[in-house]
């Protein structure tokens, strides 16, 4: 019999948030963190534009979880560039859409040939990082989670289509989640057009043809989002903030809800769940938590793409994470914004919690100059934040959870003589 999940979530209305929400519980708790850099960032929210959500998970004797969100400077109207975190909903939606193509013999591993039919588009008929040399949606999803690959994101965007992405997310209850562009320079009109593509069998027989698509739906750009004091455009310095009003937009609580939905689907209303299978959930769980060194295809250079490469809350230099800890997450970094949505599991000490955070680290205030304070402020702050809550969870009294559901089988990278990938667009 399936267990019944009991959930309590502190809800925040996106339409009524007039100022940042901070829970007193977190204010009192974080006073115990004596790290000077951490306290410096916390003392200057106007500079670092940080906000975070700590999700406490408590289990009962039947292992049913209760999730409670605590907020620190959460503000749905304060913009941060979501960067690669938008790859999370696209990966889930891609799996969902694939189920509508099952009648044609198409699944996540089916080879797909992507064509070009409009200005700015590129075709893709081969993928040298795949074992069979062919692109597939499964391989794209792997790459966006393992190292946050941008090309893989663009291909999922094209598979789904701009209209489908936004209509489906809004229908699921994410009204402020807006995805308008690929991660390649294109005009707004070019981003409204998406490629045609063909799914083929292993023998090369055509299974399904997807025609090029166009999104005629209007977007709501009523909220003006600008950041920085100046920005570069084609080597020219413009002494004005960069305008993100028409860019991708995600709120922090939506990222938390998306990750919760695929980790604890029974915890959300049925109307907000994605139409994916148990196999899909396991696939997502595996690659949300897998390290670049634990895959043969693609074969990444682990000295560059080290285990904690996209695990901000546990990234201290290139230190290896303990074997008993896994982080199921999606991180993103761009324009000085660093964001991570994570579910942290310690199988040895029976610890689990979620943490979702963003911080802006751009000391000179100039956008597009590739001079951001990721290594000196962003990563140390997020590491301190993650470790603080991890240590708190180690001390917290709770009923020990059964975490076997989140144990995954991982592949160890083989020493087969193939060259490893040292550089990727991410």
Image (cartoon, helix red, strand yellow):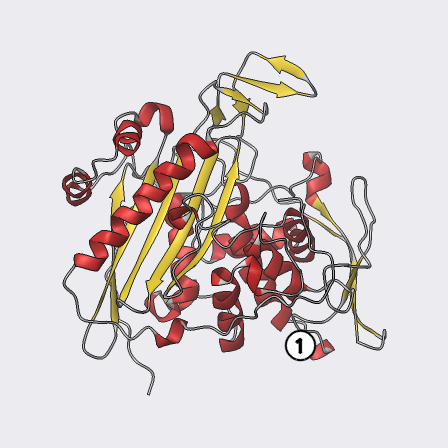
Classify mark 1: helix, strand or loop: helix
In the rendered image, residue 35, in percent from the top left (x then y), is placed at 25, 35
Q: In the rendered view, would you say 336 is above or below 86?
A: above
* Left or right position of 382 against 217: left
Q: In the rendered view, would you say 326 is above or below 2?
A: above
Q: Residue furthest top?
A: 239
Q: Which residue is mark 1?
A: 102
* Left or right position of 215 against 254: right
In the rendered image, residue 250, in percent from the top left (x then y), is placed at 46, 43
Displayed quadrant of residue 323? bottom left
Image quadrant occupied by the N terminus = bottom left
- Report the residue at 54% width, 25% height from top: 371
In the rendered image, residue 19, in percent from the top left (x then y), is placed at 27, 32
* Left or right position of 394 against 230: left
In the rendered image, residue 36, in percent from the top left (x then y), is placed at 26, 30
- Report the residue at 50% width, 47% height from top: 85
Q: Residues within 10 Å of mark 1 (few under 14, many from 20)?
A: few
Which of 203/293 is in front?
293
Which of 35/3 is in front?
35
Q: In the rendered view, would you say 35 is above or below 367?
A: below
Image quadrant occupied by the C terminus = top right
Q: Is residue 80 visible?
A: no
- Report the residue at 78% width, 45% height from top: 121
- Report the residue at 71% width, 36% height from top: 186
* Left or right position of 35 against 355: left
């Amino acid at each position: 019999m399936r267990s019944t999940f009991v959930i309590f979530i502190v809800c925040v209305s996106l339409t009524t948030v007039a100022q940042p929400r901070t829970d007193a519980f977190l204010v009192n708790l974080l006073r115990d963190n004596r790290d000077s850099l951490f306290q410096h960032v916390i003392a200057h929210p106007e500079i670092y534009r940080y906000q975070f959500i700590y999700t406490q998970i408590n289990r009962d004797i039947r292992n049913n979880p209760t999730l409670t969100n605590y907020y620190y400077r959460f503000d749905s109207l304060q913009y941060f560039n979501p960067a690669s975190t938008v790859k999370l909903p696209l990966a889930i939606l891609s799996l969902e859409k694939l189920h509508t193509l099952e009648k044609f013999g198409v699944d996540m591993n089916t080879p797909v040939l992507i064509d070009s039919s409009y200005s700015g588009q590129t075709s893709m008929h081969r993928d040298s990082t795949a074992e069979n040399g062919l692109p597939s949606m499964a391989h794209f999803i792997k790459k966006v989670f393992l190292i946050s690959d941008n090309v893989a994101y663009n291909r999922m965007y094209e598979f789904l289509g701009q209209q489908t992405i936004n209509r489906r997310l809004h229908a699921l209850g994410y009204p402020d989640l807006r995805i308008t562009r690929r991660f390649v320079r294109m005009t707004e009109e070019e981003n409204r057009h998406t490629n045609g593509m063909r799914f083929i069998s292993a023998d090369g027989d055509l299974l399904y043809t997807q025609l090029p698509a166009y999104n005629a739906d209007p977007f709501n750009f009523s909220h003006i989002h600008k950041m920085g004091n100046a920005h570069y455009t084609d080597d020219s310095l413009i002494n004005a903030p960069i305008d993100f009003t028409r860019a991708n937009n995600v709120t922090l609580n939506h990222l938390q809800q998306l990750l919760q939905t695929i980790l604890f689907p029974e915890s959300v209303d049925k109307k907000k769940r994605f139409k994916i299978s148990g196999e899909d959930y396991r696939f997502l769980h595996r690659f949300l938590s897998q390290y670049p060194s634990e895959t043969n295809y693609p074969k990444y250079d682990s000295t560059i793409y080290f285990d904690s490469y996209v695990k901000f809350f546990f990234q201290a230099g290139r230190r290896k994470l303990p074997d008993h800890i896994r982080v199921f997450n999606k991180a993103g970094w761009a324009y000085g914004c660093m964001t991570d949505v994570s579910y942290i599991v310690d199988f040895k000490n029976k610890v689990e919690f979620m943490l979702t955070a963003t911080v802006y680290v751009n000391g000179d205030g100039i956008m597009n100059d590739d001079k951001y304070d990721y290594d000196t402020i962003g990563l140390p702050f997020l590491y301190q934040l993650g470790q603080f809550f991890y240590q708190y969870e180690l001390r917290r009294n709770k009923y020990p959870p059964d975490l076997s559901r989140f144990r995954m089988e991982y592949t160890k990278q083989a020493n087969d003589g193939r060259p490893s990938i040292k550089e990727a667009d991410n």
